[in-house]
Amino acid sequence: MNQDIGKGGRKLHVVVVGAGILGASIAYHLTLHGAQVTIVDAGQPGEGATRVAFAWLNAYGKTPFSYHDLNRRSIDMWAGFARRLGIDVTWGGELRWAATDAGAAALAEQAEALQAWGYPTRILDADQVGQLEPDLRFDAFTAASYTYSDGHVDTAAVMRACLAAACERGAVVRAGSAVTGVEIGRSRAGLPRAEAVRIGDDVVSCDAVALVGGADMPALAEMAGIQVPHYHTFGATLLTQPLPPLFKTIALLHSPRERQPLINVRQLPNGAVMIQSGSLDNTQEGDRGATDAEAAQIAADARAVLPMLRDIEIAEVRRGRRPIPQDGRSIVGFAPEVANVYVATTHSGVTLTPLIGAFAAIEIVHGARVEVLAPFRPERFGSPV
Ligand SMILES: Cc1cc2nc3c(=O)[nH]c(=O)nc-3n(C[C@H](O)[C@H](O)[C@H](O)COP(=O)(O)OP(=O)(O)OC[C@H]3O[C@@H](n4cnc5c(N)ncnc54)[C@H](O)[C@@H]3O)c2cc1C
């Protein structure tokens, strides 16, 4: 952070643009460090990607090691974060099964790679799965893998708790307030710096700005003369009517990756089952579920693949945009172009909520550079043309 802000005894005023789960976490952590925070959203807080998210807390299949490790650290931070906010995390681990020999071999190879990075994934046979989940039946089975460290969260509850805790420390939430511009002036050293954000005719002055706009990051960054190489894919999740508890131990279940359709399942604390059905790489192709007919087909597929879901009915379909940095990894840090503008955007933003919130606040308020964020700086994309 610039050395000349927030001096003179007054609190540092940070405007956080975007009240999704990342903006809410950054705002909350900023208040823990004594900053005055205004958090602004074009719509209602948490109505972007955050509302749609499958919300699996994981570091599975994330490469390279630095990105896996970032996610892993954040999973480890979730328990303390949740305790401080008084919210629940559904722990219990992630189970996936294979339906073919090739699928079993792929699971074993992935488990071996994850074990070498210290991730607690192991291969189970049918009997071992039966011990873990006696009521689980599959249409076809050759092997399974189980990762005990993983969990999931209710993103709406996280949002409410972060914003309430931030407001208790003086933060102001401005919903329905689209930021339309960022006013750029000059620091004493003659460098560009953000002086205020514009919300229509309203000008909100600030010492620093955090841009946390999810899929709208490119447009938002452009307002500050910043480049954030970024795209988005279509994302969808289905919610069923509340069902009796599906699982004894596990928190999440993934169908075989070697065949279509992919079915991802978790059960929320209120009994509703969330189902997601994407391609193998939903960061490239996005999810199924854009139309009601597709959503109905996902439900039919889930009933066929998992006997325990035979009675599901669709209660709600959530649709949105999944924010994805150009190289698939988080972009976090001060923008090289404007020294007091901080950017934070990522896929896996639910997993990364405690870590990005906590570390961004330290960097914005204290001017520190948190070492583990070094591979994720905006500068890695090179100088803007
Ligand atoms: C289907 C799906 C499944 C997913 N599954 C997982 C998962 O299992 N695990 C995981 O960790 N992550 C998952 N994710 C990713 C995760 O949801 C996102 O990374 C995370 O929600 C991003 O949070 P955010 O706060 O950056 O963005 P958002 O929640 O999109 O919030 C951005 C906010 O910025 C606001 N905004 C934009 N422009 C402006 C403006 N000009 N002025 C004011 N406000 C503005 C928007 O209104 C919005 O509220 C999934 C995403 C999808 C879509």
Image (cartoon, rainbow, N blue to C red):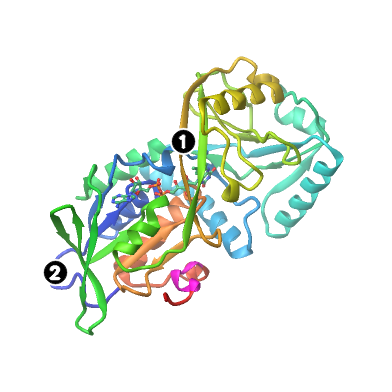
54 w.r.t. 181: above or below: above
Q: Secondary structure at mark 1?
A: strand
| Magenta-span inclusion, residue 298 | no
Q: Which residue is mark 1?
A: 319
Determine crowd level at label 2: few under 14, some 14-19, many 20+ residues with C-alpha closer than 10 A. Answer: few
Query: Given the current orientation, which residue lies at the most extreme right position?
Result: 101
**Which of the 4 image quarters holds residue 84?**
top left
Q: Residue at x 57, y 61 (%)?
A: 67
- The image quadrant of residue 157 is top left
Q: Amino acid at mark 1?
A: Arg
Label 1, residues with CA under 10 Å away: few <14, some 14-19, many ≥20 = many
Q: Which residues are magenta?
A: 376-381
> What is the x, y in percent for residue 285?
59, 46
- Dominant secondary structure of the residues highlighted in magenta in the image: helix
Mark in front: 1 vs 2: 1
Mark 1 or 2 closer to N-term? Answer: 2
